Image: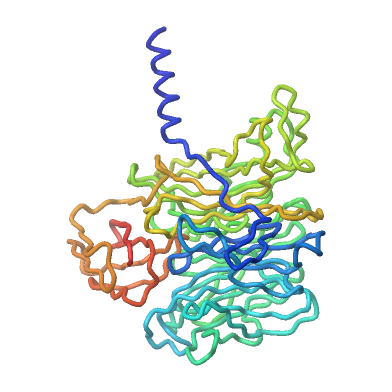
Amino acid sequence: MNKIFLLLFLVIAVTNLFAQTWTSNYSPGAIDANSQLTGGNEIMQIVSHKGKLFAGNSYWQEFDTINNPRSCEIIRKDNSISSWQVDKDFTTANLRVGAMKSFIFNTNFSGASITPDTLLITIPNDNDGQVNCWVRNDNTNTWNVNTLANVQTNVNCRALGFHKDATNNICYVFAGLMDYGIFRGSYNASLPTKIQWTLTPEFVTPTNERVMGFTVCNNEIYAATSDGGIGHIYKRTDASASWSLVKTTTDGPQAEDIRGLSAIPNPNGAGEVLWYSWNKKASRIDPFNNYAETVEYAYTDSLTSQLGIQVQYIIAAYNDNFPVFNPTNANEDIRIIGIELKYNATALLSNPKPNWNGWGIDGQYYERHQKGSNIYYVRKFIVNNSPLVTDTLVATRTICVSPFASDNGKVLYAGGMDCNSIPMSRQAWIYTANFNGPTSSISTFSNINSISVYPNPASSEINISFSLSNNFTIEIINTLGEAVLKFQNQTKIDVSQMAKGIYYLKVCDNQKTYTQKIILQ
């Protein structure tokens, strides 16, 4: 019996040792360094860009129009101890920052190599029908704009993607617009925004369907669209600049959008497969097996079992299936999936929980663990799930690894709130946590001990030394898990023009993979 108590004590101690503690980092209602009132109802995006954090702060459903302007904004955090401040105000026609990304271009509109240039890009929703692309000028701390199109209805952009065309070597940025399709842009240094866009969509999506995600899987780019219980996944063919349907999902009108489209390691072999959330389930499809679907996890079934009452509604993976890297287990891939759920809290007679109009308010999310073919999901909370909760953390929408050198890649920022069409004021939130336990830094799926990367930290050049085959690829991956640069059979990498911050170097020779965290300063 004493051995059992000792074992239980050790389990609890280890669990507490590795638990992450989240603290509030942004609450609306403060005055920033420029004497501007910070507000907002939804943090829809948090993005690492050139060593700083930028967040898309939205004002959808704002009812206090006297004290809070009805225009979305970009807020900025310069270091780990600074406060958030307003970086860009839009107009009253713009209520939501539905999509914002940071991309590194190393070729221009003609496919010619250029000095790598990192651009922060957003297309805010626009009630006047202006499809405006805004790009930050980091030298002047201002934003430049160009117009893609004028449309008849509200502009709704919820996804931006990036891909280097294998045929013409051009780096493309893709923007998905509801009702209008996928627009394409490329790098042109002569323009104020440095992005030139096609004036017509490269691909027209089905009517009423929103493009909710892009991802690159096995060096090919995919897009997910959905509406009214019907979802589609398309693949781009670079040679013809065309998109073809590879998967249709139909689950009835209660099915939510396809969300979190991302590439994950293939649990059954080499290469990558596609992962997404759809209709209360997490699924993956295999490009090597005619896009056959495997349901990995049924959110509502599991939550109903855990809570003891029927879960009425769930959204999972608002933007991404976010990678969090793990150095303590070289074969484990960990992703974080933000969620929102609705249930009758008063029905939990043994442990009633507070809620906001039926929505859980404790900032819930899942960790998805994959080690080989073994996959499991763990539900977690940003704030304690108890009757003592006072913070209204509805909907964990976005998660980002801190770019600040002092955080050493071990700190996460999470933000959220979903208005769910309910009028409100000043409900946006950002929390942060130090992951100093199992979920911290980078994983190496197949560690090659004979490799060395130097210098690290680096400022101008990285050298790579190893004993591999003569044919290998090198990728530089940002903190979103996206490959921002790719090289073939190259052991010296020029990083002098890249933004400072934390990246990951991935070396593959078709047999083994090595991943190393690098710091550019």
**Residue 450 percent location from the top left of the image:** 18, 55
516 vs 383: above or below: below
Q: How many marks?
A: 0
Please indicate whether residue 356 sits to the left or right of residue 267 in the image. right
Q: Is residue 457 something that shows in the picture?
A: yes
Please indicate whether residue 35 sits to the left or right of residue 441 in the image. right
Quadrant where the C terminus lies? bottom left
Quadrant where the N terminus lies? top left
Between 298 and 483, the one lying in front of the other is 483
Task: Give the farthest residue toward the top.
Answer: 1
115 vs 125: above or below: below
Tell me the quarter of the picture where residue 31 sits. bottom right
- Way the structure is coloured: rainbow
Tell me the quarter of the picture where residue 371 sits. top left
Residue at left 43%, top 54%? 265
**Residue 402 percent location from the top left of the image:** 45, 56
Q: Is residue 277 something that shows in the picture?
A: no
**Residue 47 percent location from the top left of the image:** 52, 63
Between 56 and 306, the one lying in front of the other is 56
Residue at left 68%, top 38%? 390
Between 415 and 165, the one lying in front of the other is 415
Please indicate whether residue 340 sits to the left or right of residue 243 in the image. right
Residue at left 36%, top 50%? 443
Please indicate whether residue 449 sits to the left or right of residue 319 in the image. left
**Residue 65 percent location from the top left of the image:** 81, 64
494 vs 218: above or below: below
100 vs 325: above or below: below
Between 71 and 324, the one lying in front of the other is 71
Tell me the quarter of the picture where residue 107 sits. bottom left
